[in-house]
Amino acid sequence: MSYTLKQLLDEGTAFLENKGIMDYKTDAWYLLSDICHVRRVDYLIDPHMPVDALDAERYMDCIRRRGDGCPLQYITGTQEFMGIPFKVNEHVLIPRLDTEILVDTVLKYLPEEARVLDMCTGSGCILLSIMASKKTALGHGVDVSPKALKVAMENERQLRETAQYEYLSTGGPAVKWMCGDLFENLTDTYDVIVSNPPYIPSGQISGLMAEVRAHEPYLALDGKEDGLFFYRRIIAQAADFLSDNGMIFFEIGWDQAEAVSELLESAGFHQIQVRKDLAGLDRVVFASIN
Ligand code: GLN
């Protein structure tokens, strides 16, 4: 059967509403716009435009995936972060708006030509958005998952092809992506270490929203018993990998500021500061080594 844009959108919308998807109208629209390459204005001018049969089939496949709870971003394969479109798939965490506070904090303190390490880089969104806004001398991204690093590399390639990011597209330093368990394969020193490590206590993962729990990588969420496993390990080794004026920046869960600040203090860090997110919750902890 052949469909018009409107018929297809109505069918997708009704399907998602039936499945109890909260933003069923916007999600059905985004998928239509993505698959049929229509902008809102095209739709409004001619909602009765016929849709290619193959596109209609692909649309309903995507609608069914969304109906089963797969996050929209894994279906469209993209999420914007710091104004940059990043590729995502089920091997990486979907970049969060809250994490922009972390990047914004780093950018406030980052000297020109800094050497930056992004620990647990995932999609590479943190490191790449830093490098897209500020001239860096070197960028290293580490992750334990080779599949995540493949996504990060793809994001680097995509960003370099976008002329808007002049520095990166005209020969800024290549990012070195390294697979490993935290610092195990590192030998350089850095001016900044930034990390949004997995920080959900294992026992709380089953209580997360189904979309997160069942679709985002467990590895990217699980902060082990008390959620602080990776902060402890990163902080224990960070001083060996920081330059004399080095700084460290972490994203944290809303109730972890005190614990992470104490870990930093015990490891000899100074000027420990906490920054809140837009919801007024503690979100970033950062400190200097000297
Ligand atoms: N650094 C990535 C992000 O912030 C991945 C974080 C993670 O996997 N815990 O999106």
Image (tube, rainbow, N blue to C red):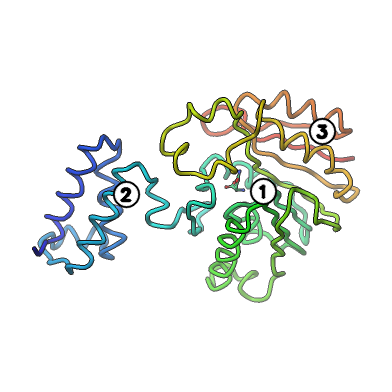
Taking the spot 15% from the left edge, 49% from the top edge, the residue there is 11
Taking the image as shown, residue 93 lies to the left or right of residue 240, namely: left
Residue placed most toward the observer, 106 or 265: 265
Q: Earlier in the sequence, mark 1 or mark 3?
A: 1
Please state the horizontal and vertical placement of residue 281, each as a whole percent of the image: 57, 27
Give me the C-alpha separation between circle 2 and circle 1. Answer: 28 Å
Rate crowding at label 1 as few (under 14), some (14 to 19) or many (20 or more) other CA atoms within 10 Å. many
Q: Amino acid at mark 3?
A: Gln
Q: Earlier in the sequence, mark 2 or mark 1?
A: 2
Residue for badge 1: 120
Q: Secondary structure at mark 2?
A: helix
Q: Which residue was labeled with disc 2? A: 65
Mark 1 or mark 3, whichever is nearer to me: 1
- Number of the front mark, 3 or 2: 2
Which type of secondary structure does the marked residue at label 3 adopt?
strand
Q: Which residue is mark 3?
A: 271
**Can you say whether 62 is above or below 36 in the image?**
above
- At 13% from the left and 63% from the top, the residue drawn is 46
Label 1 sits on what residue type? Cys
Q: Is mark 1 within 8 Å of ligand 1?
A: yes
Which three-letter amino acid code belongs to the residue tagged 2? Arg
Instruction: Find the distance from the CA under tag 3 to the CA under tag 2.
Output: 47 Å
Mark 1–mark 3 contact, CB under 8 Å?
no
Q: Which quadrant would residue 136 be assigned to in this image?
A: bottom right
Residue 67 x %, y %: 28, 43
